[in-house]
Each structure stands twice: as structure tokens, then as C-alpha cells.
Image: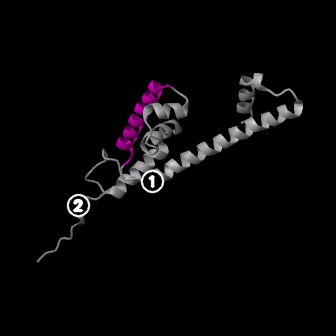
Amino acid sequence: MAADAFLVVWRRLDELPGRHEDARAWIFGITRNILLNTHRGEQRRFALGVRLADAAALTYLDQDADPIVNRVDLGRAWRILSEVHQEALGLVVFEDLTAPQAAAVLGISPVAFRLRLSRARRALRLLLEHLPQPCRAPASSLERTTTP
């Protein structure tokens, strides 16, 4: 956090107030804003994880499988997914932002965001395809057989 604050101060050095007391308060204000932004980002990532747990299973999941199992698989894949990928998917899926809007939020170009989103979707798809599946007994073995 201190490094981030000094970086902002360095970049905005021409705005530094002349009086020592004012400069000190100005630097504290910058540091406070960085702390608040970091806290908001952490809350947003946590909220996205919670909302994912509540979201319906995605359409490309196994349609024959139990929806509860699909949600568990999606939740596990989400937790394994990198924060960068979670953020890209979350901005588009949960926040319903367009690529240019999401790019502006992240401070990157729309092209860079589309690439990041494509990689995030691919990573999630690969995780969903390669997670160890829970052991499920075939339906025929669950039927009760009786002899007359």
C-alpha cells in the first residue's frame, strides 16, 4: 500500500501543496483513497464469489446431470480460477458490462479486455471439463431388484 501511495504522489508531484502540513494531509488523502479502493475491490471479488454460488448452472454444463452437482462443479472451478479471470467474467456476467465498459473499469483497452475475457472463458471451460467428477452410481444399480 505504501508503494502504491508513493507512486501516485510521484506521478502527481506537480500538484503537491506548498505548505508542509497541507502536503502531509494531501498524501494521507491519497493513501486513504488507495486503501478504500483496495477494500472495495476485495468486497467486489467476495460478492462475485457469493453471487456465483447462488447463480443458476451455466447452459454449457452437462444437461443430464443433477443441477446441484453442476453448481458444486462451477463453484469449485470458480475458486480455482485466477482473480484476473474471475474479475473479467464477473464484470461481464454479473455486472452486465460491455467489453468497452469493463475495459474502462480495469483501465485497459477494449481489445485487451476481450482477450482477457476469452482467456477467462477458456480457463473456466477447461476447469469444468477436467475437474474430478464425484463418483456417481449408475441409475440401474440404484433400482431395487426383487424376485417374485
Residue 83, given in percent of the width and then of the height, sits at 53, 39
Residue 42, numbered circle: none
Chain part drawn in magenta: 109-132
Residue 93, given in percent of the width and then of the height, sits at 42, 43
Residue type, numbered disc 1: Ala
Tell me the CA gap for discs 2 and 1: 27 Å
Q: Are marks 2 and 1 in contact (CB under 8 Å)?
A: no
What residue appears at the point 69 percent right and 38 percent down from the top-left corner?
A: 34
Along the line of sight, the residue nearer the viewer: 123 or 57: 57
Q: How many marks?
A: 2
Give the structural element (helix, strand or loop) at label 2: helix
- What is the crowding at mark 2: few (fewer than 14 residues within 10 Å), some, or many (at least 20)? few
Q: Is residue 134 visible?
A: no
Residue 22, given in percent of the width and then of the height, sits at 85, 33
Image quadrant where one finds the C terminus: bottom left
Give the structural element (helix, strand or loop) at label 1: helix
Instruction: State which tag comes first along the sequence, 2 or 1.
Output: 1
Residue 14 falls left or right of residue 45? right
What residue appears at the point 75 percent right and 28 percent down from the top-left corner?
A: 9
Residue type, numbered disc 2: Ala
Q: Which residue is most to the right?
A: 20
What residue appears at the point 72 percent right and 27 percent down from the top-left corner?
A: 7
Image quadrant where one finds the N terminus: top right
Residue 40 falls left or right of residue 94? right
Above or below, 8 relative to 97: above
Q: Which residue is most to the top?
A: 14
The residue that disc 2 covers is 139
Q: Which residue is most to the bottom?
A: 148
Along the line of sight, the residue nearer the viewer: 56 or 79: 56
Determine the image quadrant of residue 97. top left
- What is the crowding at mark 1: few (fewer than 14 residues within 10 Å), some, or many (at least 20)? some
Residue 53, numbered circle: 1
